[in-house]
Image (spheres, rainbow, N blue to C red):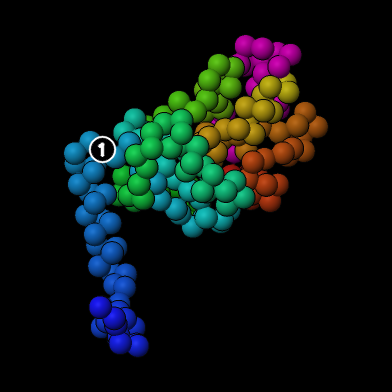
Amino acid sequence: MTTAPGADAALFSALPGRDDDALARLHTRLAAEAEREGLLDVAYRTLETPVGELLLASTVQGLVRVAFPGQDHTAALEQLAERVSPRVLHAPPRLDEVARQLDEYFAGRRTRFELPLDFRLSKGFRRSVLAHLTEIGYGRTESYAEVATAAGSPRAVRAVGTACATNPLPIVVPCHRVVRTDGSAGGYAGGPQAKLTLLTLEAAA
């Protein structure tokens, strides 16, 4: 059987076009059903902030990842799929409270985050460093050497730097409050401007 020239084009042109609103509604329904059935292991969303668009991801245990724009959101999601679960889905509602508290922080109305955290992406000494970082108060800083001592290994200054650089929960676990002994800012996963923005925000408050 042969098809008349142009018949295929006419057939496909008669099909309805892509309905983005309908697709969005279906996705929202899928995410809600996955959450209800306990199948949503990692939910994520993005949030616009003064330091760029952040990727936020949460397990049922709590916030597991915050990634800056320069950290490659796609790579961060792939890491979560490999190290946590392949059941990763864009599902903003689980992260509504995280987004609300971050908005309050950047507006200068919040000095402490009150969120459940999932630290599974950090192990050993790095995990000990992150535990101490949560104790550095808003508007305060500590040197890498001071953090090393507080984490139980006074000579592990370089390891503290690595722990801060690989912190999976920046801002919420405030590695931006760790500076060099001479008071200069030092490195930061989100970039030097992001670190300066955060330190300036807290100093102003």
- Residue 193 in magenta stretch: no
- The residue nearer to you, when weighing 151 against 18, is 18
User: Residue placed at 25% from the left, 67% from the top?
Assistant: 22
Left or right of 33? Residue 145 is right
Above or below — where is 114 with respect to 69? above
Which residue corresponds to the image point at 29% horizontal and 82% vertical from the top-left? Answer: 3
Residue 50 visible? The answer is yes
**Residue type at tag 1:** Leu
Answer with left or right where residue 57 lies relative to residue 73. left
Taking the spot 48% from the left edge, 48% from the top edge, the residue there is 55
Residue furthest right in the image:
182
In the rendered image, residue 102, in percent from the top left (x then y), is placed at: 45, 47
User: Disc 1 on helix, strand or loop?
Assistant: loop
Residue 204 appears in view = no
Where residue 89 sits in the image (x, y, percent)?
Answer: 35, 47
Q: Farthest residue to the bottom: give it.
A: 5
The number of discs equals: 1
- In magenta stretch: residue 143: yes
Q: Is residue 84 above or below residue 191?
A: above
Viewer-side residue, 21 vs 56: 21
Which quadrant of the figure contains the N terminus?
A: bottom left
**Residue 113 placement (x, y as % from top left):** 44, 37
Q: Report the residue marked by disc 1.
A: 39
- Magenta segment boundaries in residue numbering: 136-156
Horizontal placement of 145 versus 126: left or right? right
> Residue 61 appears in which quarter of the rendering?
top left
Of the pair 22 and 94, the residue shown nearer to us: 22
